[in-house]
Image: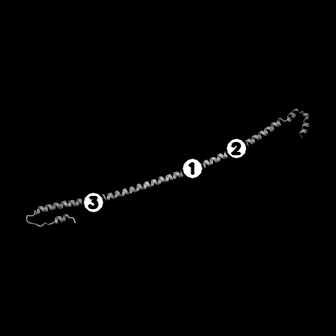
Amino acid sequence: MPLTPLDIHNKEFSSKFRGYDEDEVNEFLDQVVKDYEMVIREKKNLEEKVAQLEEKLGHFTNIEETLNKSILVAQETAEEVKGNAAKESKLIIKEAEKNADRIINEALSKSRRISMDVEELKKQAKVFRTRLKMLVEAQLEMIENDDWENLFDTEIGDEDELIENNA
């Protein structure tokens, strides 16, 4: 057990012949007591300061741990967000490709229908042209018919005969 200032103060020395001067020893012991008390106070102050600093250190250590955890969570979250963004972009690309395929298929289908409609219109135009040509030829044939010449050569009195011939 360490010495206390009171132990030093209460220490009694036995007297011997030709020993040390008692007043001088007592003064020295008083000085030792004062210095020892000062050292003890300093030690106590330093221990308190160490305790405060350890408390602050503990606080900062907790903050550091919290920050490290926060950084890890942020990194994990960033990786997760990046992964989700990559998945979403792939889904968007797939959806866009599906839509592009659908649009292309619809366009090809419309193109085929239009081509078929054009071919049908060409056929109808050929049929119309052929019929028109036949009609025009029939009309020309009627115009070039000799009956017109007979009509122009016929006299007004011959009308009755013309009517009988045509009937």
Query: 133 above or below 4?
Result: above
Residue flagged by tag 2: what amino acid is it?
A: Glu
Q: For numbered disc 2, what is the local secondary structure? A: helix
Tell me which residue sits at (15%, 61%) in the image. Answer: 30
Query: 156 above or below 14?
Result: above
Spatial separation of the CA atoms under disc 3 and disc 2: 104 Å
> How dense is the environment of label 3, judged by Cα within 10 Å: few (below 14), some, or many (20 and up)?
few
The image quadrant of residue 15 is bottom left
In this rendered view, identify the residue nearer to me: 82 or 58.
Answer: 82
Indicate which disc residue 33 carries: none
Label 2, on which residue? 119
Spatial separation of the CA atoms under disc 1 and disc 3: 72 Å
Q: Position of residue 29 (x, y in %)?
A: 15, 62
Label 3, on which residue? 48
Q: Position of residue 63 (x, y in %)?
A: 36, 56
Spatial separation of the CA atoms under disc 1 and disc 2: 32 Å
Q: For numbered disc 1, what is the local secondary structure? A: helix
> How dense is the environment of label 1, judged by Cα within 10 Å: few (below 14), some, or many (20 and up)?
few
Residue flagged by tag 1: what amino acid is it?
A: Glu
Q: Position of residue 22 (x, y in %)?
A: 11, 63
Residue flagged by tag 3: what amino acid is it?
A: Glu
Query: 16 above or below 87?
Result: below
Quick one: label 3 or label 2, which is nearer the N terminus? 3
Indicate which disc residue 97 carries: 1
